[in-house]
Amino acid sequence: VQLQASGGGLVQAGGSLRLSCAASRRTLKMGWFRQAPGKEREFVSAITWSGGITRYADSVKGRFTISRDNAKSTVYLQMNSLKPEDTALYYCAADFRFQPLDDSAGYDYWGQGTLVTVSS
């Protein structure tokens, strides 16, 4: 499974960005993770292809929305009300297992990162 992430960029605090991740084939779930400089990779959000079950990290609930386009095998992460602490390299990931949704150990396939920088 190949994943192509895009949509990162530089935005001011309070602004919005939409990340996209195109998959070469459908899996069972896709997720977004991020890694800030000097920090460990952390879970952001995940969605299942069938049923559209979603999950969010507490830090992004109410600000980020994950969605999918089955026809395009693409997952989106709409990020609103961005904060400087959202600055990170964002990775999309995919896997054929349902669980876990919110742990990087549950994902075997990873895309390249896309950089999100939020200025204050």
Image (cartoon, helix red, strand yellow):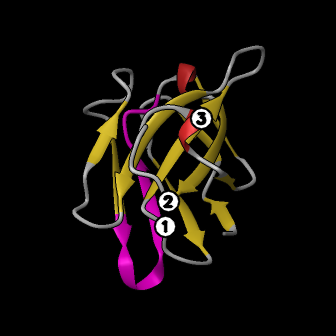
Measured Cα–Cα span from mark 3 to mark 1: 16 Å
Q: How many labels does the image show?
A: 3
Q: Position of residue 90 (x, y in %)?
A: 63, 41
Q: Which residue is drawn at 34% across and 34% down?
A: 56
Q: Which mark is residue 27?
A: 1
Callout 3: SS: helix
Amino acid of disc 2: Phe
Q: Which amino acid does label 3 sit on?
A: Ala
Bounds of the magenta segment: 68-82
Task: Give the quadrant of residue 91.
Answer: top right
Q: Which one is earlier in the sequence, the residue at label 3 or at label 1?
A: 1
Q: In the depicted view, which residue is nearer to us: 109 or 44?
A: 109
On residue 118, the disc is none
Q: What residue type is labelled 1?
A: Thr
74 w.r.t. 55: above or below: below
* Within-10-Å neighbours for mark 1: few <14, some 14–19, many 20+: some
The residue carrying mark 3 is 105
Where residue 70 appears, as percent x and y from the top left, is: 37, 78
Q: In which quarter of the image is the N terminus?
A: bottom right
Q: In this view, does 28 lie above or below 69?
A: above
Q: Residue at x 36, y 52 (%)?
A: 47
On residue 96, the disc is 2
Residue 113, percent from left and from top? 72, 48
Say few, some or many: other residues with alpha carbon within 10 Å of mark 3 (under 14 / 14 to 19 / 20 or more): few
